[in-house]
Image: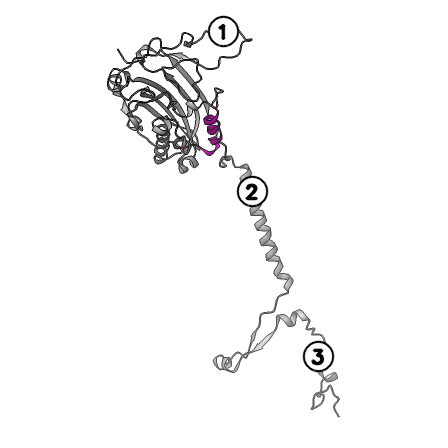
Amino acid sequence: MASRGDPPEGTPEGLPGGGEDEYRSVVFDEAFVRAARLQEFSASERMGEPARAVRSVPAVRDGRSGSRPTVLLVLLILLAFGTALYLGVRNPYQPPADQRAEPLRTTVVPLAPRGPVVGGTPERLFGHSPAAEYGVGAAGINLPLAGRTSHFAESQVVTALSIAKDYLVASGLEPDVLSGATVRPPRVLLDPDQLEQFDRSVETPTNDGRHALAAWLVRFDPREAVLADPGVRVQGVLHYEETGTETLDVLADHTYTYALRPAAQAPGAAASLFTVHRVVRFRFDRDDLRMHRAELLTSTAEAGPQACGPDSTGTLRPLLAGARAPDGGRPPVTDPYATARPAAPSLCGTLAPAAQPSP
């Protein structure tokens, strides 16, 4: 009788131990079994491929083996990031850091006449003065022929010149600015970093090289003088130059000639000419060009006829028709070795006779 572990027909004859010793030396370990997994084809698959009854099934990989590509990927990402960071630190052509606009440096020079101020009608005064051939208003501020620079396109140069002209018009030709009614037209064209300095110059103008309002704009006291002719005569030039890879400078050198009359007199009263020579250096970066604004670096205004004594760093104080500069109004003698005395409160010059209309 066969035991429970023997086959039904018993142990085969002729095989010692039932044939177990013949295969005892063959060891089927777990790795071998996983690698040799077979799967029987379905009935329909066997009909199509009669020669093949089974197919190999890919063994399931150990979960720990999948972590190696992930670790390598992370290492590669960290290496690439470190390389980019290293090159960025050592790159000498990094974009410049955002810099604040510099404060405007201001200079105002009154020009005192040697004799009485010539009076007459605006037409006669203009026609007999150096301003006879000047343009009228904004037409006197002409843009030069523009071209590209090393780092700025032609369109950017034209934009810089146009903004400079807009500021010159707003600060020297706008009637409400000239009368002191508003300062908004030139203010909206300034770099935001200079607004605090500008506002202080409007509220408390001083001759400290930073807060002379007359260097920012032209203003007359409407209680003393008003325009006798709205057509201000202007002539000058604009120059541009690239001062860095990110900055473009524009130099404006213009002379404005105003026909003024006393505010207390009738419109037909004798008028006189008042001349302001302004030299303004603008600076533009790419944000300024995009936002249509300007930074003022330096501004010098020479204005006359006016007396040297009164402070004209805020509102200009023109001498009108028939007036003379006070005896003490001529430029004083200054001794640079007299260190005990206070410094002169302001600069002053003498108005050239040829700057006045001929009698």
Q: Quadrant of residue 280?
A: top left
- Name the colour scheme: one colour
Amino acid type shown at disc 1: Asp
- In depth, the one of 15 and 92 nearer the eye is 92
Q: Nearer the viewer, mark 2 or mark 3?
A: 2
Say if the magenta span includes residue 300: no
Residue where numbered disc 3 is placed: 22
Q: Tell which circle, 1 or 3, labels the residue nearer the N-terminal end.
A: 3
Is disc 1 in contact with disc 3, using a CB cutoff of under 8 Å? no
Amino acid type shown at disc 2: Leu
Q: Which residues are magenta?
A: 189-204
- In space, the residues marked 2 and 3 are separated at their CA atoms by 68 Å
Residue 296 rendering spot, x and y as whole percentages: 43, 27
Crowd rating for badge 3 (residues with CA inside 10 Å; few <14, some 14–19, many 20+)? few
Examine the residues drawn in magenta and state their main secondary structure. Answer: helix
Location of the N terminus by quadrant is bottom right
Q: Work out whether residue 266 can be spotted.
A: yes
Q: Helix, strand or loop at disc 2?
A: helix
Residue 200 rendering spot, x and y as whole percentages: 48, 27
Crowd rating for badge 1 (residues with CA inside 10 Å; few <14, some 14–19, many 20+)? few
Q: Is residue 161 left or right of residue 52?
A: left
Crowd rating for badge 2 (residues with CA inside 10 Å; few <14, some 14–19, many 20+)? few
Which mark identifies residue 297? none
Q: Helix, strand or loop at disc 3?
A: helix
Residue where numbered disc 1 is placed: 335
- In space, the residues marked 1 and 3 are separated at their CA atoms by 128 Å
Residue where numbered disc 2 is placed: 85
Q: Nearer the viewer, mark 1 or mark 3?
A: 1
Residue 338 rendering spot, x and y as whole percentages: 53, 7
Residue 23 rendering spot, x and y as whole percentages: 70, 78
Taking 55 as reference, is 273 above or below it? Answer: above
Location of the C terminus by quadrant is top left
